[in-house]
Amino acid sequence: MYDYCFYSNGKILLTGEYILLKGALGLALPTKKGQFLLIKKLNHNKYFYWVSINEKKEIFFKAYFNFFSLNILYCSNIKIALYIQNILKIIKKIKPFIFNIGLKIKTILEFPLNWGLGSSSTLICNISKWTKINLYYLFKKISNGSGYDVYCSLYGSSLLYNLKNNKPNINFIYFNPPFKKKLYFIYLNKKKNTEEEIIFFLKKKNNIIPIDLFNNFTKEILKTKKLNIFENVLFLYEKEISKILNIKCIKEKYFKNYQGIVKSLGAWGGDFALVSKRKGMKNYFYKKGYNIIIPFEKMIL
C-alpha cells in the first residue's frame, strides 16, 4: 500500500520543435498514456529505494540511495541513477523535510521508454505534484528545454505554448480536426537525446528565424478544416525548419515517394512522425520496416 499516488500524461509536439526556444508558438498534444509515481514511507531512516516499471510491468531500473548523503548504494543503471540522484538532491535542497524518513519511490510507465512520449517530463511533473515545488523552477534545474512538455503533462490538455521573457505562456486549446481519422503516428525507432539536440540547436549561429511565419503556420494548422490545407502547411513548415537546421526533411530523406505528409515530431529524425493516410499506407511503411502505426485517436487524449 502506497501513501501517495500521482499521474501525468505523456506529450507530442506537433509544431514548435527547436524554435520554441526562440519564442515561437508550439502546438503540444497530450497522449492517452502517461506515467505514475507512487510514494511509500518506510519505518526507518537507512535509505531511499527507487524502482521503475515499464509498460510490460517489468522492472527496468532500481537503486538504493543513502538516507543522509543520497550517495548511490546500488543501481542497475548508473546513467539513470545519476539522473535520479540529481533530482533527489534538488528536492532535498529546497524541501529537506520531505526526506525525514526512508522512502520507497516507484514509477510505472504506460508507454515504452524509447518512444519519447515524455518519460522525463511526466516524472518531473509528478515530482512537482508530490513535493509542491514550482514545476517550471524544478524543470529548469534539470533541463535546458522550453518546458512545453511538463505543462502538457501537468494539464493533460492540448496547448499553444511559447516563452515570453523566458517564462511560459500557456493557452489551452481544443485540437480536434475533422480529418483526424486520416492521421497516424509512425514509430521511427531512432530515438534522439533531447538535451543533446537542444544544445546542437542553440550552438547554431547566424540563423535568422522568422518567428511570425512559424506562428502563422501553427495558427493555420489549428483553424483549418481540410486535410489538404493541413498537409500543405505542415509541408511548408518542414521546409522552413529544414533550412534553419540545415538538415533534410524526414520525408525527403526516407519517404520521398509517399503521397501524404510525413512530419517529424520533436527532435528531428527521432521517435515518431505524423503521417496522413493514403491508399496502401500501412503496406508502404511495413515494407520499409516501420510496423508500429498508431491512429491519432488511439494516441492523443
Image: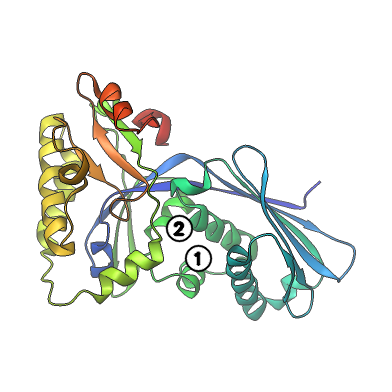
SS at badge 1: helix
Asked where in the image residue 130 lies, by quadrant, the reply is: bottom right
Going by the numbered disc 1, the residue's amino acid type is Leu
129 to 178, vertically: above or below? below
Asked where in the image residue 230 lies, by quadrant, the reply is: top left
Task: Point out residue 202 in the picture as x, y percentages from the top left corner.
Answer: 27, 73
Observer-side mark, 1 or 2, equals: 2
Residue 125 - label: none
Residue at figure coordinates x 10%, y 35% from the top left? 229
Q: Disc 1 and disc 2: Cα gap in Å?
A: 8 Å
Q: Which residue is mark 1?
A: 135
Residue at figure coordinates x 37%, y 49% from the top left? 190
The one of 145 and 57 positioned closer to us in this rendering: 57
Task: Point out residue 293 in the picture as x, y percentages from the top left corner.
Answer: 37, 30
If the image is split into quadrants, where does the C terminus sit?
top left
Give the mark nearest the N terminus, 1 or 2.
1
Residue at figure coordinates x 23%, y 69% from the top left? 22
199 to 273, vertically: above or below? below
Residue at figure coordinates x 33%, y 27% from the top left? 286
- Asked whether the viewer can see residue 226, the reply is no
97 to 250, vertically: above or below? below
